[in-house]
């Protein structure tokens, strides 16, 4: 018995030493990683390595799960999305591998190369001294001159004399979250990588117009153009989705235990209810759920309830349930989650047939104590939109307080 215990102790010690030794092979500090979307488009993102690995998108920091070291590689899972970085340790200052997004399939892999260095995110702007001024609000059109065109607001921040740019694009169905990058004398470069989406924006300034391209991963690319217009606004998110007639909201789905869940029911009688139509794979839905958690924690005692109806990526009901349970536990959310089905706006529109359409994940329905719909909100203006987000939080808090008072 003593010999077995001794051998076990030696084995565990060797494993511990091996893990520590691998960690020591990676130099701590600031890194710049690059996703090779194709032969012409490289998406850079900031990575900070200390005892853990953290991706930085402007004001957002995403701490990856505890690194797992196997042989000569490190495996890094994202905390909220079903994706992973797999990086071979080439040397102390270089990692080489790929990003795999399991929501799109195990074969959806994009090469990733990381090096230990400081400086500009985009190499084109490394020594730029006279950058363009991108600061302000831009009226933007994606896929211009096509039947698929859609409007957006470009919101960019730039300190005078600096070539560092942060901001986002706000559309009628959500925002492109925390973008950061650089500008040169005639061009703008922005990116965001959060484990679900890999966004790359490039544009050249011609006269007063930005003319550019937008890559989403290696599967989508479109054109866009924009010009400064401080007065431009999108259609209000409260005007896009609405009740077709006087029919009240009702549905019959399953909860996270596979049991029938119907709405309305006695548990929600005389309560103010938010029905959130969402998916755990959706970054805008993540941002909204984090806000709704704070709303629920503050107002649940006064009569606020929230039901998240989830439309998920996966092959089976079990896949859907596992994803939602993981999401709910990670965020430590106490309100109810139910399974709508696969990640399809058509499926959601069928379930919520009383609405004119489901244009976006997320979409939220606000219901008063009388059971009547008071407001439907399409999309979500997340924290990356700055004042738009602040305004939405202020208005929504006020709406909930008003509904609770009646």
Image (cartoon, rainbow, N blue to C red):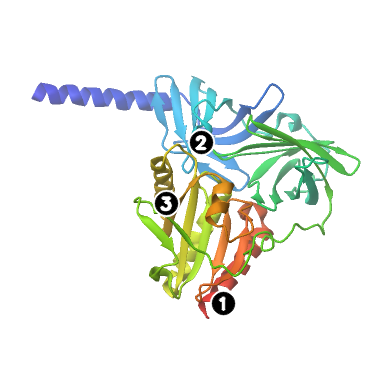
Answer few, some or many: residues within 10 Å of disc 2's Cα (few below 14, many 20 plus, some between 14 and 19): some
Residue depicted at x 53% and y 73%: 368
Q: Quadrant of residue 300?
A: bottom left
In x, y percent, where is residue 116?
Answer: 57, 28
Q: Quadrant of residue 237?
A: bottom right
Asked if 108 appears above or below 384 in the picture, the reply is above
> How far separated are the C-alphas under marks 3 and 1?
28 Å
Comes first in the chain, label 3 or label 1? 3
Task: Using the image as rendered, state which of residue 18 and residue 356 is in the foreground.
Answer: 356
Describe residue 68's horizontal placement relative to residue 376 as left or right. left
Describe residue 310's horizontal placement relative to residue 171 as left or right. left
Task: Using the image as rendered, state which of residue 344 and residue 351 is in the foreground.
Answer: 351
Badge number at residue 402: 1
Comes first in the chain, label 1 or label 2? 2
Asked if 101 appears above or below 225 in the picture, the reply is above
Q: Secondary structure at mark 2?
A: helix
Answer few, some or many: residues within 10 Å of disc 3's Cα (few below 14, many 20 plus, some between 14 and 19): some
In x, y percent, where is residue 32?
Answer: 61, 31
Q: Is residue 28 visible?
A: yes
The residue singled out by tag 3 in the image is: 328
């Amino acid at each position: 018995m003593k010999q077995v215990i001794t051998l076990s102790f030696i084995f565990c010690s060797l494993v511990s030493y091996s893990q520590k030794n691998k960690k020591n092979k990676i130099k701590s500090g600031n890194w710049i990683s690059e996703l090779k979307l194709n032969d012409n488009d490289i998406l850079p993102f900031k990575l900070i390595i200390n005892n853990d690995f953290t991706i930085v998108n402007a004001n957002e920091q995403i701490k990856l799960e505890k690194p797992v070291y196997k042989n000569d590689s490190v495996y890094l899972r994202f905390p909220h999305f079903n994706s992973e970085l797999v990086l071979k340790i080439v040397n102390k200052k270089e990692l080489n591998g790929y990003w795999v997004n399991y929501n799109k399939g195990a074969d959806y892999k994009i090469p990733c190369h990381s090096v230990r260095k400081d400086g500009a995110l985009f190499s084109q702007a490394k020594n730029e001294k006279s950058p363009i001024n991108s600061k302000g609000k831009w009226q933007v059109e994606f896929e211009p001159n096509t039947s698929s065109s859609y409007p957006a607001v470009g919101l960019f921040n730039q300190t005078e004399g600096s070539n560092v740019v942060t901001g986002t694009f706000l559309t009628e169905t959500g925002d492109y979250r925390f973008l950061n990058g650089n500008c040169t004398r005639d061009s703008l470069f922005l990116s965001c990588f959060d484990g679900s989406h890999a966004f790359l924006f490039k544009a050249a300034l011609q006269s007063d117009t930005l003319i550019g391209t937008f890559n989403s991963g290696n599967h989508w690319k479109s054109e866009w153009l924009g010009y400064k217009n401080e007065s431009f606004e999108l259609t209000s998110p409260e005007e896009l989705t609405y009740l077709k007639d006087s029919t009240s909201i009702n549905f019959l789905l399953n909860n996270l235990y596979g049991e029938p869940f119907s709405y309305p029911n006695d548990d929600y009688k005389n309560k103010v209810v938010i029905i959130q139509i969402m998916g755990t794979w959706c970054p805008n839905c993540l941002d909204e759920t984090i806000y709704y958690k704070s709303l629920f924690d503050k107002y649940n005692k006064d009569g606020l309830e929230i039901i998240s109806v989830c439309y998920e990526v996966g092959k089976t009901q079990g896949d859907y349930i596992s994803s939602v349970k993981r999401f709910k536990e990670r965020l430590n959310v106490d309100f109810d989650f139910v399974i709508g089905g696969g990640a399809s706006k058509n499926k959601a529109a069928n379930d919520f047939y009383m609405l004119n359409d489901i244009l976006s994940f997320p979409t939220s329905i606000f219901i008063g104590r009388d059971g009547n719909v008071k407001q439907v909100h399409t999309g979500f203006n997340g924290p990356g939109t700055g004042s738009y987000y602040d305004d939405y939080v202020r208005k929504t808090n006020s709406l909930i307080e008003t509904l609770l008072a009646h």
